Amino acid sequence: YKMEVVQVNGEVIGELSRLVKRVGEQQREIVLELSKELGKHNMLAEKAIQREERLLQKVNRIEEKIMQKEIYNYKEIQQQIKRRREMQAKNVLSNKQQDENMVPQIFKEMEEAENSDGFDSCEEDHVADPESLKNVKRTGNPFFDFNIDIKELQISEPDLAFSIKIGRKMIVDYIEKGCDIDDEGWKLFPQKAGFKNYPVQAFYPETIRANPTYKFRILIPKCELQ
């Protein structure tokens, strides 16, 4: 290797030393500034983390309260639904029991009505004692009250009573036959017809053809025996 010896002036060495020193000071300032900025960043990051933790805790508390409230309302609503269903079930059972209890009475009244229509009773010619009818009260039930009225009428006007029983038999037969009418395939006219208390229902076929057939039904009004 070839070595060369360079002579350096003392002033140049001093200048270089000052430059090195100034560079070192600048580097130190830069490092200190970077450390300060890094410290600020770490502090801000820590504060942000703490803020996020506080917000998360707050959200958790709010969610817990909401869940507790929703669960409470849900349980209360379910209890209300359960009570309502139990009440409906009790009403259904009560209505069913009431209907079952009414069935024998209805059959009894129908049997009494059938036996009083003028033909099917073996007691047709039996005339009630007037004294036995004094304490008998009308109930508003047409089946039961008819028997009372007809028994009273048998005493005062037996011929009229017999005529009424024949007429009632015809009405009963007409109603029983009318109940078998099938309205499937027929539509009811929306317009009302007939006189007051004597409505007339008109029906027309759902499928209209040439020369269609119409049918009319006269409803039997509610009236008293006389």
Image: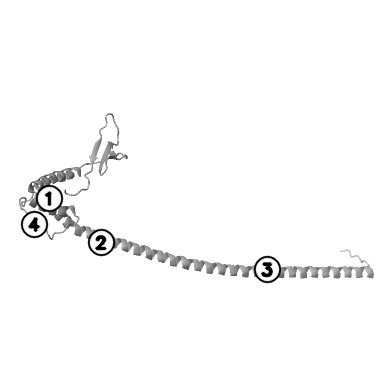
Residue 94, disc: 2
Q: Quadrant of the N terminus?
A: bottom right
Q: Nearer the viewer, residue 23 or 128?
A: 128
Mark 2 vs mark 1: which is more N-terminal?
2
Q: Nearer the viewer, mark 4 or mark 3?
A: 4
Measured in 3D between alpha carbons, the distance from the residue under mark 4 to the one under mark 1, in whole angstroms, is 23 Å
Which residue is denoted by mark 1 in the rendering?
Answer: 114
Residue 158, disc: none
Which residue is denoted by mark 4 in the rendering?
Answer: 130
Q: Position of residue 69 (x, y in %)?
A: 47, 67
Mark 2 vs mark 4: which is more N-terminal?
2
Give the SS element for disc 3.
helix
Measured in 3D between alpha carbons, the distance from the residue under mark 2 to the one under mark 4, in whole angstroms, is 41 Å
Name, please, the residue furthest toward the top. 210
Mark 4 vs mark 3: which is more N-terminal?
3
Q: Is residue 196 above or below residue 14?
A: above
**Amino acid type, mark 2:** Ser
Q: Nearer the viewer, residue 131 or 44?
A: 131
Which residue is denoted by mark 3 in the rendering?
Answer: 44
**Amino acid type, mark 1:** Glu
Q: Nearer the viewer, mark 3 or mark 2?
A: 2
Measured in 3D between alpha carbons, the distance from the residue under mark 4 to the one under mark 3, in whole angstroms, is 112 Å
